Image: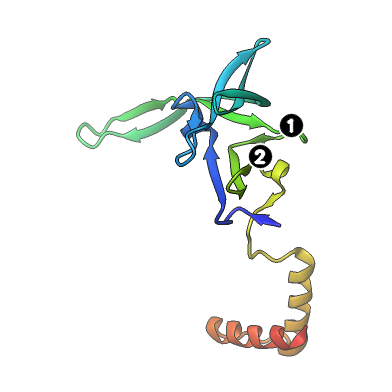
Amino acid sequence: MLTDYHPYLLKISVQQEIIKQDGWQHPMHKAIELKLIEEANCCCLALFVNGFDTNRRWNLHEQIIPSLTVKYRDEETNQKRTKIYSFGMRFYVVGATDHKRFDHLYYYEVSPSEFKIGTRTELGIRYATRCRTKTRRDKEQRIMRDVFGKKKLPKCRYRQSRNWVLRHAF
């Protein structure tokens, strides 16, 4: 299972690295590049290896971000002012298998001669997280309620005893 902190995984930002720079080229292997191309009234990203098209494509989705209006009081004149910030467009890649929008593509080097490029779901990448599921949290709360009852412990004392109880309960 791949996580997003894998050492051979390179995260490619669609907005920052591809759209603003008109394409992406691998920092070490200059033969691997992603280019913006237009075909059939649709803009997409195409993968090129050694200058040849590999027919691997990801459609681009653009989202218009509405302007943000901020009201503030001018310090010198003490008058109310309004400032409008316009952020423009946001670009996403549409996944080939699930048709979801993604901010990043991932480059995964399987071996020195083999690589994969795709979205998080296409490569099977999972986010590395320490969050517990709801059932796990409920089970922990039941155990803590059984052990301590309803009495309140100080935060640090609660954390120490909680860890000890949970370590020995499962």
Give how far across and how far down residue 46 sits, in percent.
Answer: 61, 25
**Residue 44 in the figure: left or right of residue 143:** left
Residue 96: mark: 1
Mark 1: few/some/many CA within 10 Å (<14, 14-19, 20+): some
**Residue 1 in the figure: left or right of residue 23:** right
In the picture, which quadrant includes the N terminus?
bottom right
Q: Compared to 73, does 170 lie above or below?
A: below
User: Please, which residue is most extreme toward the left here?
Assistant: 76
**Real-space Cα separation, disc 1 to disc 2, in angstroms:** 9 Å
The answer to whether marks 1 and 2 mark residues whose Cβ atoms lie closer than 8 Å is yes
Residue 58: mark: none
Q: Return the residue nearer the eye: 88 or 41.
A: 41
Give how far across and how far down residue 157 sits, in percent.
Answer: 56, 87
Give how far across and how far down residue 136 sits, in percent.
Answer: 76, 70
Residue, x 47% and y 23% (percent of image)?
22
Determine which quarter of the picture holds residue 43.
top right
Determine which quarter of the picture holds residue 97.
top right
